[in-house]
Amino acid sequence: MMNLREKYRIPDHAVITIAGTVGVGKSTLTKALAKALNFRTSLEKVDTNPYLEKFYDDFERWSFHLQIYFLAERFKEQKRMFEYGGGFVQDRSIYEDAHIFAKMHFENGTMTAVDYETYTSLFQAMVMTPYFPHPDLLIYLEGSFDEVMKRIRERGRPMEQKTPVSYWKEMYERYETWINEFNFCPVLRININEYDIIGDEQSIEPIIQKAAAIIHEYERIKNNRRR
């Protein structure tokens, strides 16, 4: 495959984040996009997460621990990516943890008000500052709830497969609300049925073409503001 980064003039320093609910194929797209652009990947460290399995067994006991762990790990990753000078595709954003997962557990009573306030104040101190480097583009993967559940049943981790459908339904709806309000960086929405990276490697190119157009427009706007 030719160098798609050069063909579509994706900046070498770009950081692209893949977002979406559990089961939409973020990790698969992250790896395929990084390969096509010759970028590094920033993947969730699921296997070394000391809280994830415990969390699925007892939301109330472990939700705060899990969210603090994710916040710290994603902040370190964000710092690492920009210290490298960019050139990364990232699996899941730091924003999803705060505005979907932590918020959902607080509102459902599986995270205490004190813990949620502590988490939120940390998130704001770390992320809601002019110095925090936001991605150049967020690619949001979306599809029908039935398709998402089908993928969780087929490919999900055992702890995800035994989680009640109602949990995934609520998360799905919260994601839809969140993306409609998201404004930290430009967004490209892609339906998961529009491409098949595993069956057709070349289906990644239209995604890169769309991503490039948004990144270039964003760069143009930023340059105009500096003048």
Image: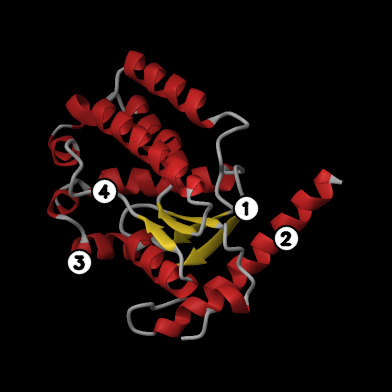
On the picture, is 114 further left or further right than 214? left
Circle 3: element type: helix
Gap between marks 4 and 2, in whole Å? 33 Å
Instruction: Please tell me which residue is depicted at 26% across the width and 48% down the height of the picture.
Output: 45
Q: Position of residue 80 (x, y in %)?
A: 43, 44
* Up-down relation of residue 64 to residue 41 (above or below): above
Tell me the amino acid under the disc marked 4: Lys
Q: Position of residue 135 (x, y in %)?
A: 55, 49
Task: Please tell me which of labels 4 and 3 falls first in the chain.
Answer: 4
On the picture, is 61 further left or further right than 42? left
On the picture, is 213 further left or further right than 108? right
**Which residue bears the numbered disc 2?**
217
**Which residue bears the numbered disc 1?**
186
Residue 45, labelled with which disc? 4
* Up-down relation of residue 180 to residue 101 (above or below): below
- For the residue pair 61 and 17, the one nearer the viewer reads as 17
Circle 2: element type: helix
**Which residue bears the numbered disc 3?**
154
Q: Are marks 2 and 1 in contact (CB under 8 Å)?
A: yes
Q: Nearer the viewer, mark 4 or mark 1?
A: 4
Gap between marks 4 and 3, in whole Å? 21 Å
Q: Tell me where residue 111 sits by quadrant.
A: top left
